[in-house]
Image (tube, helix red, strand yellow):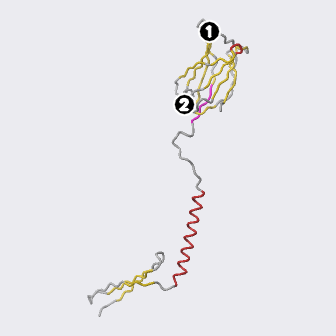
Amino acid sequence: MIIKHEFIIDVRNKLSYPIMTFVRNDTDVYILNITLLNNKQPINLTNKTVSITFKKPDNNTVTAAVNILEAEKGKVEYKLGTSEISVEGTVTAEIQIFGTNEERLTSTQFQFYVRDELDDGGGIESSTEYPILTTLISDVAHLFQRIEALENSSSQPPQVLPSTISQGDPFTSSYDLIISQGDPFTTNYNLTINQGGE
């Protein structure tokens, strides 16, 4: 699961390199394979050391050694770590070549973009809501069927459990509260008001 980007850096000519985008915090998957040229000729890297410096969007820099693959052909390789791509935005990089007499040659700069990751560890696993909606529709349909069945059975005489509240005072109205007990959804309340007294 390695992604390689191959391009040429000519220290004396206009630089041409691919558009590169990396994802923040990806680990050990991005490799830069670079051929170093001087006026279109390979730079002989025999007995030389090569490093690369990255300037991140937060203005911090990262410097690391570059692996020389083929010295006479000027071919080097660098595997990006997490530090170089830890900040979202445009990263600028350049390569330094060091000789045995402490001379240093710095390449032209190249850039790549680091985008932020979508999964920051705080996400919630997704689940489709369609089964939930189907269940709700089914429950509502069953509820309507239940109501219809209760309405059809409401013509039968309900079981009556009388409860009478009587006021003995002749000047006070007498109330008889009769509660007809039936299905909880269709309980009927009959209030009979008897005015006057004996």
Q: Nearer the viewer, mark 1 or mark 2?
A: 1
Residue at point 58% right, 65% down?
Answer: 138
The residue beneath circle 1 is 99
Q: Where is residue 20 in the image (x, y as percent from the top left)?
A: 65, 30
| Quarter of the view holding residue 160 | bottom left
> What is the distance, in whole Å, between disc 1 and disc 2 at their CAs?
32 Å
Graded by Cα atoms within 10 Å as few (under 14), some (14 to 19) or many (20 or more), the crowding at tag 1 reads some
Of the 4 image quadrants, the one containing the C terminus is bottom left
Local crowd size for mark 2, using a 10 Å CA cut-off: few (<14), some (14–19), many (≥20): many
Instruction: Tell me where residue 157 appears, x and y as whole percent.
Output: 48, 86
Can you tell which quarter of the image residue 97 is in?
top right
List the single residue furthest toward the top: 101
Picture residue at 51% right of the left edge, 42% below the top = 122
Numbered range of the magenta stretch = 111-116
Q: Is 50 situated left or right of 8 in this image?
A: left
Residue 113 in magenta stretch: yes
Q: Magenta span: helix, strand or loop, mainly?
A: strand
Q: Does the magenta stretch include residue 88?
A: no
Q: How far across and how far down the image is residue 195, in percent? A: 34, 89
User: Residue 42: x, y in percent?
Assistant: 71, 14
* Residue identifier under label 2: 87
Decide which of tag 1 and tag 2 comes sooner along the chain: 2
Image quarter for residue 87?
top right
Q: Please, is residue 56 above or below residue 46 in the view? A: below
Residue 14, numbered circle? none
Amino acid marked by disc 2: Val
